Each structure stands twice: as C-alpha cells, then as structure tokens.
Amino acid sequence: MKKILSAFLLLYFALSFSQEKKPTFWQDIQNFKKTDQENPPPKDAILLIGSSSFTKWTDVASYFPDKTIINRGFGGSRLTDLNDFADDLLSPYQPKQIIIYCGENDFADNHDLKAKVVVKRFKAFYQKIRERFPNIEVDYISIKYSPSREMLWPQMKGANKKIAAFMKKEPNAEFIDITKVMEDSSGNVRKDLFVEDMLHITPEGYEIWAKVMKPYMK
C-alpha cells in the first residue's frame, strides 16, 4: 500500500511541475517566434518594442509607408518583461533602429513605484540592446499621460525627465517626447485622443505620434 501511495505522490508532483504556469507573456513571445518562422524578419528594419500602445498600432506600417517596420509590442508589458524576454525580443532581428514604448504599466502595476526604479529598469534593457547592437539608433518614446492613470502622472513625469537626461548623453540615442503634442492650448491632456478606456489612443492620436516620430526615424 505504501509503495502504491508513494508512486501516486511521485506522479502527482511530476504532473504538477510539468503543468507549472508559464511566465506572463510567454505565449506572446511564442507567437512572435511563430510569425518569424513563417515570415523571416527583414534586415535593417525599424524594430518597435513595448507595450499595448504598440500592440494596438496594428496598421503602423501605413503611417510610415517608406519604412520597414517590425512591431513587437505586447500588451500589458512592463520594462521588467522586456528585460526578462530581452534575448527573444532582440536576437531574431538585425534592425537599423529600435524604438521603445514601455514603462507606463510598471507604474500601473505598483502605484508606489518610484521613478528611479523605472529608470533603472529602462537602463538595464538599454544596456542589453547595446551589448548586441552597439551602434544602431535607439530611441525611447516618452510615457504618455493617460487620463485613467492621472494619479500616477507625477511619477511618470519624473521618469520621463530622468530618461530624457540619460538619452541625451548617449550616442545614437534620442528621447521622443509625445506629451506636448497630446495637450490642448491650455496645456491639458486631450482626452479626445483616447478611446473610451482613457488609456489607449485613437487613430488621430497615432497620427500625432507618427508626425513626432518621423524626424527621428532612419
């Protein structure tokens, strides 16, 4: 009886470990890999990496018809996730430029998070990029001030300021500020540029982003 019980327990634990929950966004990364297998990514493209503001920009190529774009945004991702999956996000590609939009969800995930922590996370990912691509252009789009996350704006503004200062000192690097163009004449965030959830942006919002981004794009 004891042998049967022992065998049962061993089988139970083996099944438990084999069904261990995959890391968050694991499936998104597998989907990227499948896409790359079916359609090998072009060289010298502009690689977009980040969270849902990129994920939902499904027609991004139409905004930049003269550019080759690879969009690897995955919704809900944080800078911690970009660091965790850095090899999967970078190794399959040979881009001439990388543009990042990420950091907003880091604050949303932890309302007490300090700006310096998010900046540290970004610098860690930036370093991983430079280890693989020392000379390409790397740009960071400022964290947008989503109306649904107004309570987090002070930390976000602090992170934007620190990342802008960091990028200014780095070669082949730029901070792309989209916050000013998303304001009205009174300096208030334009809510009409956001969809109903007051988090994600409208096609007009993306048009504004595209106009700001174009001068930076290779």
Image: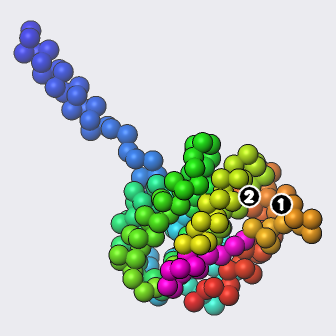
Q: Residue 171: say if magenta.
A: yes
Q: Which amino acid type corresponds to the residue marked 2 in the rendered image?
A: Tyr
**Of the pair 75 and 179, the residue shown nearer to us:** 179
Can the viewer see residue 95? yes
**Of the pair 165 and 44, the residue shown nearer to us:** 165
Q: What residue appears at the point 61 percent right and 86 percent down from the top-left corner?
A: 217
The answer to whether the residue labelled 2 contacts the one labelled 1, judged by CB atoms less than 8 Å apart, is yes
Q: Which amino acid type corresponds to the residue marked 1 in the rendered image?
A: Val
Residue under pointer 2: 145
Residue under pointer 1: 189
Left or right: residue 52 versus residue 85 is: right
Left or right: residue 93 versus residue 78 is: left
Q: Does 90 sit above or below residue 201?
A: below
Q: Identify the magenta region.
A: 167-178
Q: What residue appears at the point 57 percent right and 50 percent down from the top-left corner?
A: 114
Q: What residue appears at the point 45 percent right and 47 percent down from the top-left corner?
A: 24
Q: Quadrant of residue 177?
A: bottom right
Q: What residue appears at the point 69 percent right and 49 percent down from the top-left corner?
A: 152
Relative image position of residue 183 (x, y in whole percent): 84, 66
Q: For mark 1, give the secondary structure.
A: loop
Q: Residues within 10 Å of mark 1 (few under 14, many from 20)?
A: some
Residue, far right: 186
Q: Quadrant of residue 125?
A: bottom left
Q: Does 189 sit above or below residue 173?
A: above
Can the viewer see residue 43? no
**Of the pair 155 and 137, the residue shown nearer to us:** 155
Q: Does 120 sit above or below residue 209?
A: above
Relative image position of residue 56 (x, y in whole percent): 65, 62
Q: Does 209 sit above or below residue 124?
A: below
Left or right: residue 14 versus residue 196 is: left
Q: For mark 2, give the secondary structure.
A: loop
Cα distance between the residues tagged 2 and 1: 7 Å
